[in-house]
Image (spheres, rainbow, N blue to C red):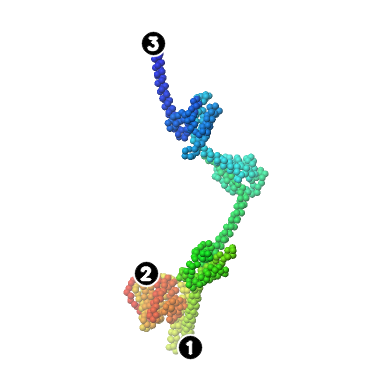
């Protein structure tokens, strides 16, 4: 009895210990299961997958809640609500196939539209779960994957394959597929026809990329997309001397595109080409036609440009007159409208002297006159130079299909310059006649002066050869010297004027003191015309005035001016003075005489002016020419019956200026 009690107690103790160990292990298993469920839920969330199972024994479904990481048991009715009806039917059929052992795995695909209206694609990967390898299945595990991107990529790949097959097998272009060794692997029907061989023949002949490209040094293992237009004398097969098909010269458009793997090794290459011989011929013919058309267009454009240029240079405008609107449309080119004005507005621009002509034109056009008409019109539109616009207008009628006058077409030419040139030509003619008269007068004066002096020289020379007294001999010699000197001065003046006109005189500036040289120049000019009762004055505002000046040419000018002043002054004084201001040196010669009239002043510097009351009139033209050579100017101011002042001005930079009180000095008589 005691033994039984002990055994019972031990049994109870063992059962208690076993129960506790079982509960501990059960809790550990639950913890591990929860951990696995959580890891599984995390994986499902990261992989955008769902997991559910089908318990074959109970016929229920287990849905993995990826939020709570727990398996939720669902009845078939509740589970069916999670899928569309047709999808659920396919799921049941697949489960039956797995239960019957027809397949070990099954994959179903279906599409579902989301609440946002987008279509998503899913895959159900179904597999059988067994306790042992050969035991009866007790569970079916199903993973639901979102394969939208995969599906779309497959669709794109499928479309690409379809496009490739469509293009490759297209009858429009030749398509050739080359393998990694560069040999022909496939050809479409068009390529076989072009190359005159079938695929088997191409493989047997060993047609390769090198044969197709036909470029020296071509490496089919390493090349970019090759594109070329080739001119073939024969087909590829004829190149191998084994083709039965011969062709004439062919223009072939070829492109070869390589395909490399990640290690840049050739996987394959695609060649596409087209026999473009007819296209090339057509293109050449079109280019020739285009070239001829361009030449014709260019010729037409040049013709239009020439017309526009001629219109621009000739001051011509195209004019259209609208009978309905009574408006003038003026074109400054063949297609460029310059302005559109009404007939009434146009009349405002017409000068009074031409109003009747213009009004008659408008009246004639308004009355549908069939005869063309033209006329010269003076406007009141000012032009540069103070001129007014002069127009030559020509109009002729234009007709419609009913042979009725629909308007008037005309041309309008600006001949203002022609009018101006006409006036200038008339004035130039007058000036030429005046110059010719002056030239004739000059020649007469020169002839008279030269003959007079020569007659004096010849006459006194003849007298000198005849018997004469000793007293007469001195008179003859003085007259010979005087006439010879005057003749020499006259010839020198003519020669100097000629050299100036021919540009044979140069300006050579040098350092010189004007204050020291002016007296000598003035004395040389005054000397031969010295008169009693006339004062000859030279004023010096500077004791020394050193500058770079052309003493030779400036001396000629001052001497000539002093000579003119002394020659024309019979009473009063002849005063010479100079001044420097603002970089300009001015030398003035003031003489008291009869003065010059405004008319004489207008032509005083002309070569044949003869404006001086005596002499040949060469001195002032010579002075004017020399001052232009020196870069200066000459100016004459005169009051009739009083004094005449001639001032020469030239630019210079003084080196030394020593002012002094003006002290008039009287040069000695020569």
Q: Nearer the viewer, mark 2 or mark 1?
A: 2
Nearest the eye: 205 or 24: 24
Identify the element where label 2 is drawn: loop
Gap between marks 2 and 1, in whole Å?
64 Å
Neighbours of disc 2 within 10 Å: few (<14), some (14-19), many (20+): few
Q: Position of residue 327 (x, y in %)?
A: 51, 65
Nearest the eye: 422 or 533: 422
Q: How many marks?
A: 3
Q: Write down the residue under mark 1.
A: 466
Neighbours of disc 1 within 10 Å: few (<14), some (14-19), many (20+): few
Figure check: 390 above or below 470? above
Gap between marks 3 and 1, in whole Å?
212 Å
Q: Quadrant of residue 159?
A: top right
- Identify the mark nearer the N-term, 3 or 1: 3
Q: Which quadrant holds the C terminus?
A: bottom left
Identify the element where label 3 is drawn: helix
Q: Nearer the viewer, mark 3 or mark 1?
A: 3
Q: Which quadrant holds the N terminus?
A: top left
Q: Position of residue 573 (x, y in %)?
A: 36, 80
Neighbours of disc 3 within 10 Å: few (<14), some (14-19), many (20+): few
Residue at the spot 57% in from the left edge and 57% down from the top edge: 294
Q: Position of residue 492 (x, y in %)?
A: 46, 77
Gap between marks 3 and 2, in whole Å?
156 Å
Nearest the eye: 369 or 456: 369
Q: Write down the residue under mark 3.
A: 2
Q: Quadrant of residue 513?
A: bottom left
Q: Quadrant of residue 481?
A: bottom left
Q: Which mark is residue 582?
A: 2
- Identify the mark nearer the N-term, 3 or 2: 3
Looking at the image, the residue that sits furthest to the right is 244
Residue 359 visible in the snapshot: yes
């Amino acid at each position: 009895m005691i033994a039984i009690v002990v055994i019972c107690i031990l049994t109870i103790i063992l059962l208690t210990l076993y129960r506790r160990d079982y509960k501990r292990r059960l809790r550990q298993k639950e913890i591990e299961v929860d951990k696995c469920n959580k890891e599984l839920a995390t994986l499902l969330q990261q992989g955008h997958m769902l997991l559910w199972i089908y318990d074959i024994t109970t016929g229920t479904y287990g849905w993995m809640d990826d939020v709570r990481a727990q398996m939720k048991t669902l009845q078939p009715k509740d589970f069916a609500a999670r899928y569309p009806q047709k999808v659920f039917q396919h799921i049941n059929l697949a489960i039956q196939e797995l239960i019957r052992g027809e397949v070990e795995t099954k994959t179903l695909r279906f599409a579902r539209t989301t609440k946002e209206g987008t279509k998503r694609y899913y895959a159900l990967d179904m597999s059988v779960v067994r306790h042992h390898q050969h035991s009866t299945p007790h569970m079916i595990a199903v993973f639901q994957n979102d394969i939208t991107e995969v599906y779309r990529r497959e669709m794109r790949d499928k479309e690409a394959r379809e496009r490739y097959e469509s293009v490759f097998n297209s009858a429009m272009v030749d398509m050739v597929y080359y393998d990694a060794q560069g040999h022909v692997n496939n050809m479409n029907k068009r390529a076989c026809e072009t190359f005159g061989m079938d695929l088997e023949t191409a493989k047997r002949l060993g047609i390769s990329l090198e044969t197709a490209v036909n470029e020296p040094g071509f490496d089919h293992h390493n090349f970019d997309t090759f594109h070329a237009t080739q001119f073939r004398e024969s087909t590829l097969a004829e190149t191998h001397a084994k083709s039965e098909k011969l062709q004439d010269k062919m223009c072939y458009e070829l492109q070869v595109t390589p395909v490399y793997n990640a290690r840049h090794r050739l996987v394959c290459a695609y060649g596409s080409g087209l026999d473009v011989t007819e296209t090339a011929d057509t293109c050449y013919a079109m280019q020739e036609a285009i070239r001829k058309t361009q030449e014709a267009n260019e010729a037409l454009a040049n013709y239009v440009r020439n017309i526009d240029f001629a219109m621009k240079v000739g001051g011509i405008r195209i004019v259209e007159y609208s009978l309905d609107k009574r408006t003038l449309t003026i074109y400054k080119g063949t297609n460029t409208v310059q302005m559109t004005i009404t007939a009434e507005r146009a009349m405002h621009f017409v000068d009074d002297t031409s109003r009747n002509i213009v009004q008659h034109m408008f009246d004639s056009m308004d009355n549908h006159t069939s005869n063309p008409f033209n006329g010269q019109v003076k406007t009141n539109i000012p032009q540069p130079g103070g001129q007014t616009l002069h127009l030559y207008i020509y109009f002729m009628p234009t007709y419609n299909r009913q042979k009725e006058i629909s308007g008037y077409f005309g041309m309008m030419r600006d001949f203002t310059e022609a009018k101006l040139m006409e006036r200038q030509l008339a004035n130039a003619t007058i000036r030429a006649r005046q110059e010719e008269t002056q030239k004739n007068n000059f020649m007469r004066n020169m002839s008279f002066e030269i003959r007079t002096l020569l007659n004096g020289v010849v006459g006194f020379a003849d007298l000198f050869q005849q018997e004469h007294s000793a007293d007469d001999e001195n008179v003859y010699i003085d007259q010979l010297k005087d006439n010879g000197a005057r003749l020499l001065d006259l010839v020198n003046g003519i020669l100097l004027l000629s050299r100036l006109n021919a540009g044979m005189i140069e300006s050579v500036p040098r350092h010189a003191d004007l204050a020291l040289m002016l007296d000598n120049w003035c004395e040389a000019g005054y000397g031969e015309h010295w008169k009693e009762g006339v004062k000859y004055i030279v004023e010096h505002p500077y004791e020394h005035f050193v500058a770079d000046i052309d003493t030779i040419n400036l001396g000629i000018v001052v001497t000539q001016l002093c000579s003119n002043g002394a020659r024309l002054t019979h009473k009063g004084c002849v005063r010479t003075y100079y001044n420097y201001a603002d970089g300009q040196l001015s030398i003035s010669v003031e003489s008291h005489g009869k003065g010059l009239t405004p008319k004489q002043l207008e032509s005083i510097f002309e070569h044949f002016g003869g404006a001086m009351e005596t002499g040949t009139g060469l001195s002032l033209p010579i002075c004017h020419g020399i001052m232009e050579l020196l870069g200066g100017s000459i100016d004459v101011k005169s009051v009739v019956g009083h004094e005449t002042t001639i001032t020469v001005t030239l630019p210079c930079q003084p080196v030394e200026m020593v002012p002094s009180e003006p002290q008039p000095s009287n040069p000695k008589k020569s």
